[in-house]
Image (cartoon, rainbow, N blue to C red):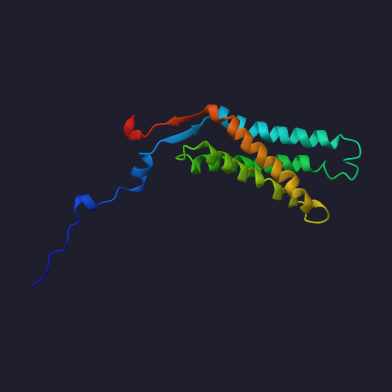
Amino acid sequence: MTTPAPEKSSARRRRGPSGAAADRPQLRLGASGWIVSWLLPTALMGALLLGLSFVPGLNQDGFLAPLIPLLGAAAVVVGIPGTLLVSWLLRHQLNPVIHVLGYVVVGLLYGPVVLVPGAAGLMPLLVPLVGFPAGILLGAGRWIAQPLARTQPAESQV
């Protein structure tokens, strides 16, 4: 005699991940909010480096001048995809502090980009000179852009 195959009851079935994700509210940052949170801090960092390069005696060895194009490269290669990825990964986190910390991490990743030309001489010492201010400025930019963010309710509640 054979036993019949067990049947799953509907009470024990789990909903798929798309159903669970669709039922949670999302924090959305529009294009203007993203520009405020990414472009303004990056431009401020570039302006700060440019201003420091004009200070007499500070740039006598010429190590600040190459940082300006490297900062631009870091903003394009690390900043744009990094901030968009953080915004997408943390879209269900409604706490703005978590988003700010994600942007700070992206800003800290600006620092290792100065090692692209080579790790000789003083270049490794410039990693924190670029990374820490960029992290602070990107985090502050995301905090300033918080009024431009909106909470989108869950799909089932609309």
- Provide residue 72's location: percent of width, then percent of height: 71, 39
In the displayed image of the protein, which residue is found farthest to the bottom?
Answer: 1
- In the rendered picture of this protein, how many numbered marks are placed on residues? 0
Residue in view at x 76 percent, y 40 percent? 69
Q: Is residue 104 above or below residue 153?
A: below
- Provide residue 4's location: percent of width, then percent of height: 12, 64
Position of the C terminus by quadrant: top left
- Residue 117 vs residue 42: left or right? right
| Residue closest to the eye, 129 or 30 | 129
- Provide residue 65's location: percent of width, then percent of height: 83, 41
- Residue 135 vs residue 145: left or right? right
| Residue closest to the eye, 153 or 73 | 153
- Residue 102 vs residue 158: left or right? right
In the displayed image of the protein, which residue is found farthest to the left?
Answer: 1
Position of the N terminus by quadrant: bottom left
Residue in view at x 11 percent, y 70 percent? 2
Residue in view at x 59 percent, y 34 percent? 142
Q: Quadrant of residue 99?
A: top right
- Provide residue 16's location: percent of width, then percent of height: 33, 48
Residue in view at x 91 percent, y 42 percent? 60
